[in-house]
Image: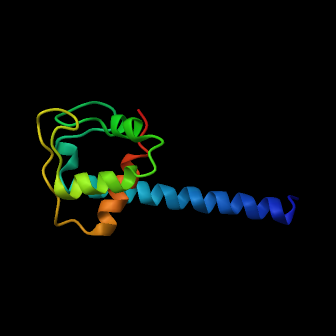
């Protein structure tokens, strides 16, 4: 039988994985509900860049999430080409943070 510390660590990992999966699902639902997938996809450029390309560009940038929150909320122009990203000013701060943090985790 596994020792108590090993069992505890295993259960913590299981709960963390479950919580992350719920966060990812919530972020994907937010992206779909707010029309983000009309211009973006996870792995390929549509109108805007792929989420994985955004994650790659901002990898290692400690201010990346805050920067993405600003771009989502107020829109952006010229970061990824000539077509501007529209503002999503009506989204809550919590939803903006959820989306920004999720985008930074998307892998190709």
Q: Quadrant of the N terminus?
A: bottom right
Residue visible at 28% across and 58% down?
A: 30
Where is residue 57 drawn, in percent x and y? Answer: 37, 36
Residue visible at 25% across and 35% down?
A: 49
Classify residue 1 as left or right of residue 30.
right
In the depicted structure, whether residue 16 falls above or below residue 58: below
Classify residue 42 as left or right of residue 47.
right
- Which of these two is toward me, 17 or 97? 97
- Which of these two is toward me, 52 or 1? 52
Confirm whether residue 28 shows in the render. Answer: no
- Which of these two is toward me, 82 or 13? 82
Where is residue 70 drawn, in percent x and y? Answer: 26, 56
Quarter of the image for residue 107 reads top left
For the image, the number of numbered tags is 0
Residue visible at 41% across and 35% down?
A: 56
In the depicted structure, whether residue 96 falls above or below residue 37: below
Confirm whether residue 101 shows in the render. Answer: yes
């Amino acid at each position: 039988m596994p020792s108590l510390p090993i069992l505890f660590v295993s259960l913590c990992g299981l709960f963390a994985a479950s919580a992350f999966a719920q966060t990812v699902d919530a972020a994907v639902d937010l992206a779909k509900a707010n029309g983000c997938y009309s211009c973006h996809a996870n792995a390929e450029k549509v109108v805007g860049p792929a989420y994985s390309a955004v994650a790659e560009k901002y990898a290692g940038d400690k201010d990346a999430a805050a920067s993405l929150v600003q771009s989502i909320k107020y829109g952006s122009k010229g970061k990824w080409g000539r077509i501007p990203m529209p503002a999503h000013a009506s989204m809550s701060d919590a939803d903006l943070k959820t989306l920004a943090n999720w985008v930074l985790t998307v892998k190709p």
